[in-house]
Image (spheres, rainbow, N blue to C red):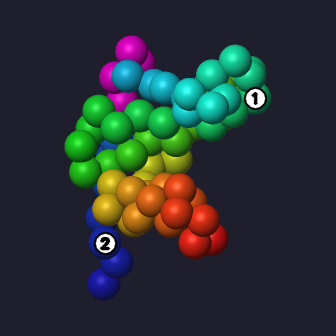
Amino acid sequence: MSAAPQSPARFDETAWFKSTASAAQNECVEVNTAAGSVIGLRDSKDVTVGTVSVAAGPFTAFVSALGADKL
């Protein structure tokens, strides 16, 4: 039995942000955490291409590992 397709998460357009380390650059990944349990990721140079949605827990662990130089 296959799971029913889920609707993509909707993200508040005003809640997208880039890392402060890359805020002056134009070719970055933007993040949206406004949906709570789902994180949105998109390409800042072409936001019309689409959004990738990931679970907040694994994404938070990934970012923490990056910050701790564990990757």
- Binning the other alpha carbons within 10 Å of mark 2 as few (below 14), some (14 to 19) or many (20 upward) gives few
Give the SS element for disc 1: loop
The residue pinned by badge 2 equals 3
> Horizontal placement of 9 versus 21: left or right?
left
Main secondary structure of the magenta stretch: loop
Q: Quadrant of residue 44?
A: top right
Does 65 sit above or below residue 41?
Answer: below
Q: Residue at x 45, y 59 (%)?
A: 64
Look at the image and give the residue range highlighted in magenta.
10-14
Q: Residue furthest bottom?
A: 1
Tell me if I can see residue 49 in this picture. no
Nearer the observer, 70 or 14: 70
Q: Residue at x 52, y 41 (%)?
A: 41
Frontmost of labels 2 and 1 is: 1
Q: Quadrant of the C terminus?
A: bottom right
> Earlier along the polypeptide chain: callout 2 or callout 1?
2
> Horizontal placement of 28 versus 6: left or right?
right
- Residue 45 in the magenta stretch? The answer is no
Q: Residue at x 39, y 57 (%)?
A: 60
Tell me the kind of residue under disc 1: Glu
The residue pinned by badge 1 equals 27
